Image (spheres, helix red, strand yellow):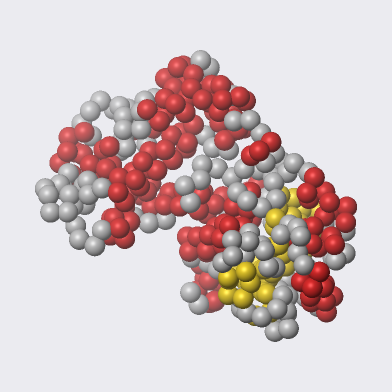
């Protein structure tokens, strides 16, 4: 997409959005865009790079605005070998590229002395270009070794329980699965919660874990240990995806009042019970759209929607694509059985809509 198109697609956030939005550790220009130099050092974790770019690429596409741009930088040459032995092509090395405003170092903690010296020389040669500096995985340790990051911050990144952090102009992320949480938190800060929610649905994520949460190997299951009512409520939701039940009934079977259930969901899952229920239904709908030739009207009914148009709108909001378009991506020819097309089961949907008011609409 052309840069002028990006500019037209973007609108300034409202005051309310600004007050709610978390701060991004990245340097942003006047149009809230981040330019990233992704420095890959030999032995870096390929999964960390993939998780970060999966999130940012999806966010740019769904928002129709290139809020995140990047260059891949090598220490030497045009190729970097990951810890899995897979080479990754770079846009250039430190002799060809200047740092962009935000530099992120991907590295194993035991990077070679030559690579560390090359990184140190590059950062020292362009101090005015760099506004933010951070590392993913062992990147903070490397920055501490070359004194580009205060050593107490670099050491703290490895010792603290947070999955990602920011202090002044420095930031870090533990790597692994926390990388996608770090990236999603930045999408929420730069492009808003609505875009972040769409990216999560595209990546089959239920929520963004907050930076203050301990890493997965240090925490107990929220559903089983922290809030047993959530476990009971989620189990009921999963079992009634095709025939949603009223939320007060879910709360009653979980053993608490609906308002208390709502507080628990917001506190622990970052979403309302209604929103979580709909995510489950739309995730099931995507399985049916992509994995079967069931007619789309039947798919809508199978996940508790009486209106095909409302289902299509919710599906678009959740996955960034209409169900008919999503179907076309996975099947080159339409089904030839009756009712396999988009409108094949409209009469059945209309019949379902004659049921007593509130039978399903409360959960849509």
Q: Position of residue 325 (x, y in %)?
A: 31, 59
Q: Position of residue 179 (x, y in %)?
A: 63, 53
Q: Name the one closer to the observer, 245 or 176.
A: 176
Write the residue at 62% across / 25% down.
Answer: 226
The reply, left or right, for residue 72 in relation to residue 352 is: right
Rendered image quadrant of residue 235: top left
**Residue sitting at the far front:** 85
Establish if 187 lies above or below 269.
Answer: below
The reply, left or right, for residue 101 in relation to residue 59 is: right
Write the residue at 71% across / 59% down.
Answer: 108
Rendered image quadrant of residue 86: bottom right
Q: Position of residue 59 (x, y in %)?
A: 53, 60
Establish if 77 lies above or below 185.
Answer: below
Write the residue at 57% across / 35% down.
Answer: 269
Task: Examine the rendering and report whether any part of residue 111 can be seen.
Answer: yes
Task: Examine the rendering and report whether any part of residue 13 can be seen.
Answer: no
Q: Name the one closer to the observer, 176 or 108.
A: 108
Establish if 261 lies above or below 2.
Answer: above
**Residue sitting at the far bottom:** 96
The reply, left or right, for residue 197 in relation to residue 131 is: left
Write the residue at 59% across / 30% down.
Answer: 222
User: Total marks drawn?
Assistant: 0
Q: Name the one closer to the observer, 305 or 292.
A: 292
Where, quadrant-wise, is the C terminus in this rendering? top left
Q: Position of residue 328 (x, y in %)?
A: 28, 60
């Amino acid at each position: 997409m052309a840069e002028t198109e990006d500019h037209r697609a973007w609108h300034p956030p409202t005051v309310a959005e600004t007050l709610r939005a978390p701060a991004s550790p990245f340097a942003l220009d006047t149009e809230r865009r981040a330019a990233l130099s992704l420095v890959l050092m030999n032995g870096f974790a390929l999964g960390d790079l993939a998780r970060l770019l999966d999130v940012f690429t999806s966010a740019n596409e769904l928002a129709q605005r290139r809020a995140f741009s990047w260059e891949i930088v090598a220490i030497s040459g045009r190729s970097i070998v990951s810890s899995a032995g897979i080479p990754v092509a770079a846009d250039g090395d430190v002799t060809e590229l200047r740092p962009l405003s935000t530099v992120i170092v991907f590295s194993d903690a035991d990077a070679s002395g030559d690579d560390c010296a090359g990184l140190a020389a590059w950062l020292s040669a362009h101090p005015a270009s760099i506004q933010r500096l951070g590392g993913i995985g062992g990147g903070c340790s490397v920055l501490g070794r070359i004194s580009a990051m205060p050593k107490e911050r670099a050491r703290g990144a490895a010792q603290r329980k947070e999955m990602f952090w920011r202090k002044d102009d420095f930031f870090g992320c533990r790597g692994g699965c926390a990388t996608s949480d770090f990236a999603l938190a930045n999408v929420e800060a730069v492009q808003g919660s609505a875009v972040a929610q769409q990216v999560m649905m595209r990546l089959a994520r239920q929520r963004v874990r907050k930076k203050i949460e301990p890493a997965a190997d240090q925490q107990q299951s929220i559903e089983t240990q922290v809030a047993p009512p959530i476990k009971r409520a989620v189990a009921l939701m999963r079992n009634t995806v095709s025939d949603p039940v009223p939320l007060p009934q879910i709360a009653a079977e979980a053993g608490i009042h609906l308002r208390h259930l709502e507080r628990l969901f917001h506190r622990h899952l970052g979403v309302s019970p209604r929103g979580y229920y709909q995510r489950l239904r739309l995730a099931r709908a995507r399985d049916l759209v992509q994995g079967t030739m069931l007619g789309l009207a039947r798919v809508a009914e199978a996940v508790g929607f009486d209106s095909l148009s409302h289902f299509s709108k919710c599906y678009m909001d959740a996955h960034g694509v209409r169900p008919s378009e999503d179907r076309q991506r996975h099947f080159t020819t339409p089904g030839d059985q009756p009712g396999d097309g988009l409108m094949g089961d409209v009469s059945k949907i209309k019949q379902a809509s004659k049921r007593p008011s509130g039978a399903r609409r409360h959960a849509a």
